[in-house]
Structures are given as C-alpha cells and as structure tokens.
Image: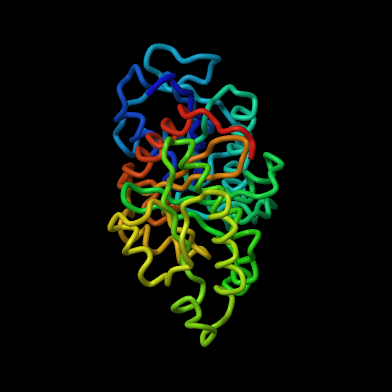
Amino acid sequence: MGKTSRVAITLGDPSGVGPEVIVKALADLPKADRVNFVVVGNVEALERANRVTGTSLRFSSGASGSDDAVLVDEVVIDGALPEIGKVSPIAGDASVRYIKRAVELAMSGAVDCMVTAPINKEAMNLAGHHFDGHTGLLAHLTKSKSSFMLLASERLNTIHVSTHVSLRTAIERATVERVLATIEAGHRHFLRLGKKARIAVAGLNPHCGEGGLFGDEDTKFLAPAVELARAKGIDVVGPISADTVYARAYGGAFDLVIAQYHDQGHIPIKLVAFETAVNVSLGLPIDRVSVDHGTAFDIAGTGKANHANMLSAIDYARMVASAPRLPAA
C-alpha cells in the first residue's frame, strides 16, 4: 500500500453508537495496527462503550500510546457524560469539538486522514452549531468554497450535486456550474486513486424531462455541463434517466453516477450496500471518510451496533491517505 498512514477517528455524538462501533472496529484490528490511529474524543465514553460491547481495549491519553493501548486525543466534556440514547446539546457540542480538533490534526499534517463517527444534527444545532452536518461544517472549518459528498461502495459510487437541502432548493442548485464542478470533483478523485472513471449524470426530472414535457432543467443545465466536461477530456455521458442509470452502473457500465440531490443518490446506495458504503468528502484540503449511518439512539448502549461500516470507512481512509494528492486544477 505504500506509506503507513496516520488516521484520526472522531467519536461522533457520545450519546449514540459511535463509541461502540469504534471500539469494536479497533478491537478487530491487529494490535500492531492500532498505533496508527488516534481517537479524538473522551476516554470515559470509550470505556463505557468498552463495557457494553465486551471489548477489552486499553486507552492512553498521553503523548503516545503504550504497548497496545489505543491513543486518545482527549476533548474534555464539561460536567457528566451525556446520557446514552438521548438528544443532548452537551453531546452535540462535544461532537463538534471532536471534529474541530481532528481538522486541526489533519491540517497540521499530524494525521493523514480523518474518519468520522455519526453525529446528530438536532443535537449539534441545539448546541448553537448551525450546519447541515459534517459536510457543511468541514467546509467551514477548512475555509473551503464548497465540498462534495461521495458515497462509495464496491459496485456503486455516487457523488451529489446537493445534499442536505429541501427538494425545491436542490432543483435550484442544479446549475451548469455546480453540475460541472461535481463531475470534475468525482473525476479527480478517481484519478487520484489511479483510475479514469466512466461517469454518468443522472437526470433531474422523470425521463430527463421527456423533451420538455416534464421540465426543461435537464436540457438547460445538465446537458451543457456534460458537454463542457467532455470538452475537458472527462469520460462522462448524460443526463440519463435516474430510474435506469443506477442499475446500469451497478451492472458495471459506469464507475460513478452524478446524483442531483440527496435521496436520488442515497436510496440506491443504501439499498445495495447498506452496511459497507462509506461517505467521502471531496473538495477539501484534507481527507475525510465517514460511516454512512446515523447515531442509532434506539440501540445505543446495548452493544448491538454493527461495526462493519466503521471497518469499511477505516479501509477506505487508508486507501485515500496513501494516494498522493493531485496538483490544484
């Protein structure tokens, strides 16, 4: 794989399943591997997760780990640890502070990539952090103009023109400029991983508007973006009706689909790769990979949370971190 990469893992909302899937995933790794990770969070929350999952990890909050102890970059929570399985502004604030600290580590070069456990958007906003989730917060913290959400799995990959906005706003955001920028972001990511992607753009309207019968956005905005991308040497086609393009991509015709809005990309990925798909942020000066599931408050504290998605995120993070960044476009 090349160089050994250092990865920071943020705890996520401490009242959710994040701590549990983290300790389960780290327990599955060889002891010698754990030295390459630092968990940004609270030792107390990790020890609570240790107890409910039955793992026997040891944690060190010193400058370096000892033996096989997991290194923790401690972010102190004022007061008692928030109650498990409940929406809490204290937990929401803590989850944001974990992310801020991990961004600092990534921006300074102390780690090569960050992996994020799930946060709760309601808790985060109750704490006064008014962002749409990780994507918007990371763009803000890194002073990036914008970022893009890629959902990656073994047989289906999709990158989104817009994510956590209303459907009405998503339609407004499907401009030539934004669709082109999304195509370019996906293209560059695959080039970084050593592959020239075959890209398809999903249509916005049913049947891509059916010649204007069901809307003209596909003709006015999506098709011109595709032509501009092709003029730049990108292997992209479309728009293709969204009710067929994902099946074609899953069957091997395309490496990447450009989704026009959140559910158009999330539904097919979660149908075919619910436990293994990961969320990758593109367009940032740092690398970030996340699990593609929520805080699961209903099972938090039971030890039942499946950590397969966290293992997938860790694997993808290592792959990305070991790939050299491309020169600025």
Residue shown at the point (65%, 54%) measured from the top left: 131
Q: Would residue 162 be seen by someone viewing this image from the given angle?
A: no
Against 110, residue 261 (above or below) is below
Quadrant of image for the N terminus: top left
8 lies left or right of 24:
right
46 lies left or right of 223:
left
**Most foreground residue, 326 or 56:** 326
Q: Position of residue 189 (x, y in %)?
A: 50, 42
Which residue of the protein is positioned furthest toward the top in this rendering? 67
**Most foreground residue, 289 or 27:** 289
Q: Would residue 130 be seen by someone viewing this image from the given angle?
A: yes
**Most foreground residue, 163 or 98:** 163
27 lies left or right of 4:
left
306 lies left or right of 43:
left
Q: Position of residue 113 (x, y in %)?
A: 52, 31
Q: Position of residue 240 (x, y in %)?
A: 43, 69
Q: How is the image coloured?
A: rainbow
Residue shown at the point (44%, 55%) measured from the top left: 199
Quadrant of image for the C terminus: top right
Q: Position of residue 59 (x, y in %)?
A: 44, 22
**Most foreground residue, 322 or 211:** 211
Residue shown at the point (47%, 43%) measured from the top left: 290
Q: How many marks?
A: 0
Against 96, residue 218 (above or below) is below
Which residue of the protein is positioned furthest toward the bottom in this rendering? 213
Residue shown at the point (43%, 22%) measured from the top left: 70
